[in-house]
Image: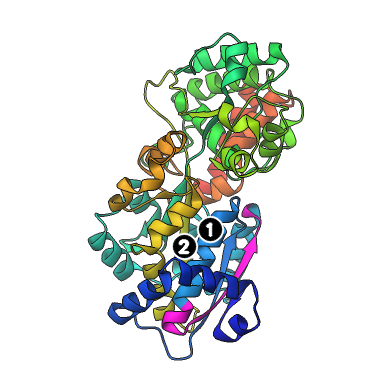
């Protein structure tokens, strides 16, 4: 979608976004913001933005309205290109390598750390926003900073929690959701017996797959590396985690070994499974579509394992700008506008809990209390551990995540292709190749 004044005249989707911005008062907000904006766009600036394809229509609508308001207020045309989430990192890597492509990429996790020297220094924007809005949460700092400078701005996080049907767990003999790993396994065994089993992705699912397998590893005290980035995944704790995941997998609906980030949504909404892990998008779709199951859906934080503390892994969504862009100030202005209030509040409202803020001032946003089923998602950015866990969040952690080392380790055990001992040693060899570079 291209945002410029000419496209508005054609009555295009961009025009609809501009109309939405006007009706919500965002146009006046943008014009007032532009007059005070410390990052003045270059004359004639045009931006290409690559983002992940939305999971919630109202989030995209709110995003596009904000982009339209930015264009109208600053004169900077913005072309938004949408790609499936799993395709963002490869496309961003190609652009970094060839020095050509989108000016801005809104990606996942630690993607900026794959090519930190190819990115614009965003420290001034980060300092500006942090000063205005109560500072950044710690996980945002971890993902955003490399070598003492901000190379990406984690615009938001996506809380990845347990989604379940209350009627399903009650039929399985549970009144409340279990809060430890042992209870969670017993629940999944019982769900299998009711004909509405659990199911979580073990294919190369960047979001849902990575989220739950890292919880499984970390909750048992396992880790890829220690605080010095020394590979330690070949450990008794990792073996215990593999044994646990194997037991869990045996309770799942068949086929999860090939699931991507969309399969679990479909299985849950079609009533094939009574429990999965996901963002709030499953619940939102049920509400928007008027499905009876919406009242039956609820959410839970991840159970605590033998390590005795929460070990959640939620998705970070950082935006970055390449240093080959001809319009660095326009890139910075765009980021600053999108994360300013009330623009950001309206975007959070549109996301209905799918996106969690990374700046502390938005803790009191109405979206977190308008519907109690959204409230646990407010804490995602503060509860999450980061890629690399005990180690650095830099390029090596990003590479390990991109190669699905942990996910493949568990998948090979769950499907019977490897013993836990062999799978752990294979994961260690893969990790050593990355961390010994």
Is 278 placed above or below 336 here? above
Query: Which disc, if any, is residue 319?
Result: 2
Residue drawn at (47%, 68%), measured in percent from left and top?
Answer: 23
Residue contact at pointers 1 and 2, CB within 8 angstroms: yes
Does the magenta segment cover residue 186?
no
Residue 325 versus residue 393 in the image, above or below:
below
Which residue is located at x 55 percent, y 51 percent?
399
Region in magenta: 71-85
Q: Is residue 140 visible?
A: yes
Position of residue 111 measured from the top left corner of the image (x, y, whole percent):
51, 56
Q: CA distance from mark 1 to mark 2?
A: 6 Å
Work out whether 186 lies above or below 23.
Answer: above
The label shown at residue 107 is 1
Residue found 57% across the figure and 37% down from its top: 283
Quick one: which residue is furthest to the right in this view?
254
Residue 224 x/y as whole percent: 49, 36
Residue 321 appearing in the image: no
Image quarter in which the N terminus is found: bottom right
- Horizontal side of 122 relative to 302 (left or right) equals left
Question: Taking 114 as reference, is 414 left or right?
Answer: right
């Amino acid at each position: 979608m291209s945002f410029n004044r000419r496209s508005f005249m054609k009555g295009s989707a961009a025009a609809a976004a501009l109309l939405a911005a006007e009706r919500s008062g965002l146009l006046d907000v943008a014009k007032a913001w532009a007059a005070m904006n410390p990052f003045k766009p270059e004359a004639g600036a045009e931006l290409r933005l690559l983002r992940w394809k939305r999971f919630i229509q109202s989030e995209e609508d709110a995003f596009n309205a904000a982009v339209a308001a930015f264009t109208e207020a600053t004169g900077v045309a913005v072309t938004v290109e949408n790609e499936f989430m799993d395709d963002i990192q490869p496309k961003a890597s190609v652009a970094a390598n060839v020095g050509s492509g989108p000016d801005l990429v809104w990606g996942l996790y630690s993607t900026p750390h794959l090519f930190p020297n190819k990115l614009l220094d965003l420290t001034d924007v980060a300092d500006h926003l942090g000063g205005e809005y109560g500072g950044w949460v710690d996980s945002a700092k971890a993902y955003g900073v490399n070598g003492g400078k901000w190379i990406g701005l984690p615009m938001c996080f996506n809380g990845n929690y347990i989604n379940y049907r209350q009627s399903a767990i009650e039929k399985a003999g549970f009144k409340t959701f279990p809060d430890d790993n042992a209870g969670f396994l017993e629940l999944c065994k019982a769900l299998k017996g009711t004909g509405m089993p659990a199911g979580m992705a073990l294919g190369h699912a960047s979001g849902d797959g990575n989220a739950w397998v890292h919880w499984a590893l970390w909750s048992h005290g396992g880790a890829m590396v220690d605080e010095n980035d020394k590979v330690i995944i070949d450990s008794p704790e990792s073996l215990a985690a593999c044994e646990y995941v194997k037991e869990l997998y045996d309770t799942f609906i068949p086929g999860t070994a090939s699931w991507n980030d969309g399969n679990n949504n479909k299985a849950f909404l079609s009533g094939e499974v009574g429990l999965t892990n996901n963002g709030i998008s499953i619940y939102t779709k049920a509400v928007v579509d008027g499905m009876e199951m919406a009242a039956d859906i609820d959410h839970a934080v991840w159970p605590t394992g033998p390590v005795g503390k929460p070990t959640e892994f939620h998705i970070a969504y950082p935006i970055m700008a390449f240093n080959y862009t001809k319009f660095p100030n326009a890139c910075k202005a765009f980021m600053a506008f999108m994360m300013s209030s009330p623009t950001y509040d309206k975007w959070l409202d549109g996301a209905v809990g799918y996106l969690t803020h990374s700046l502390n001032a938005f803790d009191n946003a109405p979206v977190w209390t308008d519907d109690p089923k959204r409230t646990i998602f407010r804490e995602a950015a503060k509860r999450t551990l980061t890629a690399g866990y005990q180690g650095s969040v830099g390029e090596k952690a990003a590479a390990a995540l991109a190669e699905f080392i942990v996910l493949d380790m568990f998948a090979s055990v769950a499907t019977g292709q490897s013993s836990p001992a062999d799978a752990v040693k294979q994961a260690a060899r893969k990790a050593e190749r990355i961390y010994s570079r």
